[in-house]
Amino acid sequence: MGDAGRVPRDPRRAVAGSLYTLLRTVDVAVEAQGLEREFKGAIKAVAGIDLAVDAGEVYGFLGPNGAGKTTTVRMLVTLLRPTGGRARVAGFDVARQPAQVRRRIGVALQEAALDLLMTGRELIELQATLHGIPKRAVRERGAELIERVGLSDAQDRRVGTYSGGMRRRLDLAMALIHEPAVLFLDEPTTGLDPASRLTLWEEVRRLKHEGTTVFLTTQYLEEADQLADRVGIIDSGKLVVEGTPSALKAQVGSPHLDVTLTSSDGAAAARQALGAFGQLRPPDAGCHVSVAVREGSSAIAPVVRALDEAGLEIASLELIEPTLDDVFLAKTGHHLEGEDAAEQGERDPYGEEAPLVQASADGHAPR
Amino acid sequence: MRVTIALARRALRNSLRRPQLLAPMIIFPSLMLAVNVGGLSHTTTLPGFPRVHGFLDFQLAAAILQSLLLAGVQLGIAVALEIEGGFFDRLAAAPIPRVSIVLGRLLAGGVIAIAQVVYFLVAGLVFGAQIQAGAGGFALVVAIGAIAGTGFGAIGMVLALRAKNASMVQGIFPLVFVVLFISSAFFPRGLLSSPADAVAAYNPLSYIADGMRNPIIAAISPSAVLEGLAAAAAVALVASVLSVLALRGRLREA
């Protein structure tokens, strides 16, 4: 073939291309192309993931147990070598420049891997030393972060005496000790009580406000919905859909109002009154009327007035909005929440979850 | 170096906070020493037995070696627990030279080994043993013990990195005694019957034991001490290299 047919490259275009690549590198905090991880026995835990997380963004990586979230994160934080594709974090290739990647990331892995024999202060100071923070600054930086996560009173207690929430907060503080450009949080609230979960959510919001890129894996829909600027949904090792939570939910339908009347006699009149607000949905009971309302909650008052004017008495009224679970259902055919992880398959070697995807002949996971 | 020292300090502190792992390496060899000295003291009159001040003096090296080997197993268990608990991943994800993870542990192992040797020598002196080579001999025993202890720690680390779970590392505990009994740690090589005497001739523990024993029971014999130092250094060097390779292998497999 040689050079036959090759178009000579315009130098101006080449410069523009390089500049674009440079700017893109700066803007994109996490980037993966065709990222794969295959384990022994041709088992693919991650089967070709493409994603890009912008700097300063909170990216929610959502999926059920065993979907491949932790395996993906372990590759991105250089704890696991990809068997296919490539990934860059903070501008560096995870396979070729792992040391540079490690310097720029903070990692809080699943189930807070802490040394239970050490005190909170000892641990955070050790972490500071591991990240090359100058000796004189170690104590000050450690104390600052301990205070930030509300562990000042417990800092001289052994971590083994901490509650789950305290351990998670300490884990987060340790991940932040060197002010990382990109923070990986792997299921940070799994197993936490609601109060501890809210505390961690607040901290993630604060980090976003400070401009830290956060790559957050979670199996909780609400968590992704509340925290993430964009959500990537992973199932069976593949990214099935990606977008902002609102855009994803809009893809599967608009909100609708479910109205239950006190008597089925008024159903026809109610359907007539509500028809003006949007498309009526099929009735599933005599006294039940459902109508799509694009305006969401702001449609409630006019609907109530219209029914009142029609002389109809309402037993109950509920605004149903699409959830990320609806998105998951639409894209995968099954629900995200409420599934038993144990039913999904064997666990992967990292304690993740894991129905690992059997690779097909073309190297792609079957859908 | 700063990271290695920080990791060594952590390992040392944790050893002190886990007395259930620390105690057996002192209590068990101490009891065995007491039993052996109490019941076998007349063996010093056997033909071929070296001239010694007492059987306790002769057995001190065996107790030290036994304790150091147990410490190696305990170090392996500690590393395996770290792998199981996920803390090892935290270290692997940190921007540090991976070799410092191994070196930090081994440095702590060396310091613990010094404390073990000093304990047994002091205990021996308290109960009537004599160190014939004096303070210099004392220092030589400590030096050989520290190097050997570091090597045994490295062996424990290799096992932990390969096995990845604490119970499997614990399972090698009986092997420690098999290897120790087929050396000249408890009895002079000349009094061992075949094939144990032949195996003992190739067992590096024999040279380490004899190297530590020599300054205790007699004036320093350069050949015995140098052989002891060389055997300890060889074990430490080979095991340390193997532990670094095992670490690399584990991180590659991960």
Image (tube, helix red, strand yellow):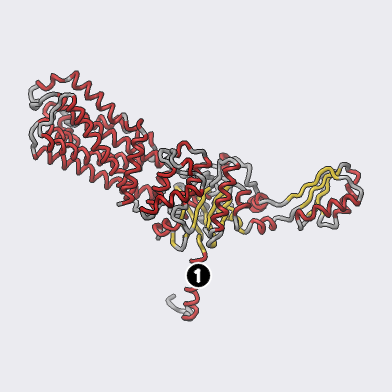
Give percent across and percent down for residue B150: 25, 41
State the residue at coordinates (56%, 45%): A189
Query: What amino acid does circle 1 point to?
Result: Leu
Residue under mark 1: which chain is it in?
Answer: A
Q: Give coordinates of residue B136: x percent, y percent.
A: 12, 38
Residue A196, picture quadrant: top right
Q: Is residue B170 visible?
A: yes
Is B248 placed left or right of B232 in the picture? right
Q: Residue A96: horizontal and vertical position, in percent?
A: 40, 60
Q: Where the N terminus of chain A falls, by quadrant?
A: bottom left
How many C-alpha atoms fall within 10 Å of the one at disc 1: few (<14), some, or many (≥20)? few
Q: Nearer the viewer, residue B7 or B83?
A: B7
**Which residue does the numbered mark 1 point to in the structure image?**
A23
Identify whether B18 is placed above or below A24: above
Q: Secondary structure at mark 1?
A: helix
Depth order, front residue of A198/B233: A198
Q: Is residue A174 left or right of residue B35?
A: right
Residue B145 lies left or right of residue A212; in this view the side is: left
